[in-house]
Image (spheres, coloured by chain):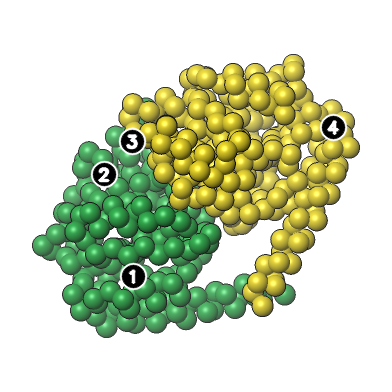
Chain colours: A yellow, B green
């Protein structure tokens, strides 16, 4: 019984995700679903990335959170269109909320739409939002074994961003070991180790987004 | 229909949590449910705390994870009985798994049982495990606004541990602001700001556990 209910939830989600994907494709828009734990640095990554895309890609951001509009305010402060999607307690964004929200964006004037998911390494990985690219975001403060402990996201990701490289001298995080864990799950996804705070090593990530 | 199913899930969970609580009370055991995001430092907190309880409280640890036995191995290395509870994809521990596991512990020989939940600031806060104390664990690397953004856990917590105080010089984290956010949700819970890595300021937390 429970299994059947879950199937229904996923089937409904997947149908709406397919509608979102069709709509975005029609407008030539690529969307990127950023998934990572609370405090992994997803918003800071966007704050560092969006100015580098300016003039090359027309961007917008859907900010998923359980509560508050902090993150959408941070993005709007950059002059980038931002919309706050509140789940009111929900632990992940669902395709329905994204589908309804994305239609309120000026789609004809956009190239790249970021969807920042609720901070959570687990649940968001189960839900297709209709994005073209799924990006896992993990910070060096979280520990290098997290891909092994939370495998689904890293299996599914089209790219992995290791953030907060500036903290490496102060935390126990072995970048090579982390990459080995990721490669056990995912042979193909590019891995970008960078610091959004200092701007260090952002270029490869930006280049990947430009060609996405 | 969905609401009804969720009610059934919670009702079944709460019944098993009540059974766990009754069993622990019968043996005079206090259990502590540690909840925080992946990489907040829950296991490191236990590694620093357990030796300080040695000789004063007889402890055991149930380690909740989606995959791997890394964390139970870290605890067992301290000579403390540890059991790994794997959710196989599940984003939180449920009362059924805890109830079945706790009966395998030598209950007559224990005073304090820690349950380290799956790394997730969101879902575990919804599920009573039958614990006597719920503890929220947040690291300074995650950002001071996380209580506002993930309110349920901080509302429900009997205590809050702010970990990785040693990272303060390297991250943007305003301890006073974080405490204000917590106090908007929870007036009573003690807040322990500490570094499990350096051992700094652990004493108040240990004293609280001793009197729990």
| Left-right relation of A131 to B31 | right
Query: Which quadrant of the figure contains the N terminus of chain B?
Result: bottom right
Q: CA distance from mark 4 to mark 1?
A: 54 Å
Query: Which badge, 3 or 4, comes first in the chain's sequence?
Result: 4
Report which residue position mark 2 lands on.
Answer: B196
User: Disc 3 versus disc 1: distance between alpha carbons?
Assistant: 32 Å
Residue at point 42% right, 55% down?
Answer: B68
User: Do the CB atoms of the residues marked 3 and 4 lie less than 8 Å apart?
Assistant: no
Q: Nearer the viewer, residue A20 or A109?
A: A20
Q: Nearer the viewer, mark 2 or mark 3?
A: 3
Q: Give the crowd class for mark 4: few <14, some 14-19, many >=20 residues within 10 Å.
A: some
Q: Nearer the viewer, mark 3 or mark 1?
A: 3
Q: Which chain does the residue under circle 4 lie in?
A: A
Q: Which mark is residue B47?
A: none
Residue B54: percent from left, percent from top? 14, 59
Q: Residues within 10 Å of mark 3 (few under 14, many from 20)?
A: some
**Which element is circle 3 on?**
loop
Callout 2 secondary element: loop
Residue B207 visible to an observer of this rendering? no
Residue appearing at x 36%, y 70% in the figure: B131
Q: The disc numbered 2 marks a residue on which chain?
A: B
Q: Which residue is mark 4?
A: A28
Residue B206 at what x, y percent from top left?
21, 55
Q: Which mark is residue B132?
A: 1
Res B162 quadrant in image: top left
Q: Residue at x 63, y 54 (%)?
A: A126
Label disc, if present, on residue A172 of the rendered structure: 3
């Amino acid at each position: 019984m429970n299994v059947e209910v879950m199937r229904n939830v996923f089937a409904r989600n997947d149908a709406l995700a397919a509608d979102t994907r069709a709509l975005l494709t029609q407008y030539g828009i690529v969307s990127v679903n950023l998934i990572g734990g609370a405090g992994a640095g997803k918003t800071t990554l966007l704050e560092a990335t969006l100015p580098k895309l300016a003039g090359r890609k027309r961007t917008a951001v859907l900010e998923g959170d359980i509560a508050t509009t902090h993150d959408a305010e941070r993005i709007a402060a950059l002059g980038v269109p931002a919309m706050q999607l509140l789940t009111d307690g929900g632990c992940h964004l669902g395709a329905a909320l994204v589908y309804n929200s994305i239609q309120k964006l000026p789609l004809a004037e956009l190239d790249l739409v970021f969807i920042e998911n609720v901070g959570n390494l687990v649940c968001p990985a189960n839900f297709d939002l209709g994005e073209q690219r799924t990006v896992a975001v993990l910070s060096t403060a979280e520990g290098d074994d997290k891909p092994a402990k939370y495998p689904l996201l890293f299996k599914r990701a089209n790219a992995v961003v290791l953030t907060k490289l500036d903290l490496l001298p102060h935390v126990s995080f072995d970048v090579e070991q982390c990459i080995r864990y990721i490669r056990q799950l995912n042979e193909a996804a590019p891995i970008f180790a960078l610091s959004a705070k200092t701007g260090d090593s952002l270029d490869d990530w930006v280049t990947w987004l430009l060609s996405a």
